[in-house]
Image (spheres, rainbow, N blue to C red):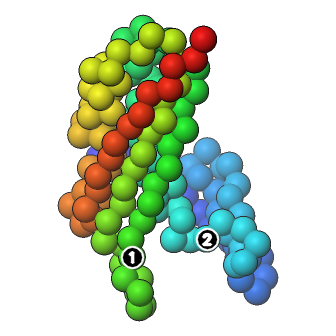
């Protein structure tokens, strides 16, 4: 088992400063900062994107950009439970192999991303991708 600690300090009113395990700050402030509920899908796409890029580099794919979005469906009433998350990857590059991109996403989501592995037990997660050819 690996033990990892993150922290949160209340600043005032509805403002909090969170720190990841390396000490990097994230400001959570309603309404002027990151919304706590946005952190869940952000963690999901952050985790998977890191792995997608690493896998595509190992596959020697010429990736020039990656943009990822997550659409969430939540209950309308408290506690506003997440029911579905749709992840969309937009991979840009030169001569990208569609099968390799699909495989990189599959490996990231199914094998390497701990956030995906944890959330898929509780939330319906789907994903798709598009390839943008750049000169």
33 with respect to 55 (left or right): right
59 with respect to 23 (left or right): left
Location of residue 31 in the rendering, given as x and y in whole percent from the top left corner: 72, 78
Q: Which of 87 and 27 is in front in this view?
A: 87
Q: Mark 1 points at which residue?
A: 74
Tell me the residue at 70%/55% (across/down). 25
61 with respect to 27 (left or right): left
The image quarter in which residue 134 lies:
top right
Location of residue 96 in the rendering, given as x and y in whole percent from the top left corner: 42, 15
Q: Nearer the viewer, residue 129 or 41?
A: 129
Location of residue 18 in the rendering, given as x and y in whole percent from the top left corner: 65, 63
Tally the numbered discs.
2
- Location of the C terminus by quadrant is top right
Outermost residue toward the bottom? 77
Q: Nearer the viewer, residue 110 or 8?
A: 110
Q: From the viewer's perspective, is the residue at label 2 or at label 1 nearer?
A: 1
* Above or below, comparing residue 135 to residue 110 in the picture: above
Q: Nearer the viewer, residue 19 or 45?
A: 45
Outermost residue toward the left? 121
Indicate which disc, 2 or 1, sits on the residue closer to the N terminus.
Answer: 2
Tell me the residue at 21%/61% (across/down). 121
Real-space CA distance between mark 2 and mark 1, rounded to the nearest whole angstrom:
14 Å
* Above or below, comparing residue 133 to residue 120 in the picture: above
Mark 1 lies on a secondary structure that is strand
Tell me the residue at 51%/71% (across/down). 37
Q: Mark 2 points at which residue?
A: 35
* Above or below, comparing residue 107 to residue 79 in the picture: above
């Amino acid at each position: 088992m690996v033990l990892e600690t993150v922290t949160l300090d209340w600043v005032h009113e509805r403002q909090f400063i969170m720190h990841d395990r390396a000490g990097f700050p994230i400001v959570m402030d309603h309404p002027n900062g990151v919304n706590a509920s946005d952190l869940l899908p952000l963690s999901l796409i952050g985790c998977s994107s890191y792995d997608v890029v690493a896998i595509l580099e190992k596959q020697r794919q010429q990736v020039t950009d990656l943009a990822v979005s997550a659409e969430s469906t939540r209950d309308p009433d408290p506690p506003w439970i997440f029911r579905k998350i749709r992840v969309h990857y937009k991979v840009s590059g030169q001569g990208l192999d569609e099968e390799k991109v699909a495989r990189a996403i599959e490996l990231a989501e199914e094998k390497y991303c701990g956030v995906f592995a944890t959330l898929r037990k509780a939330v319906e997660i789907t994903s798709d991708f598009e390839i943008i050819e750049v000169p």
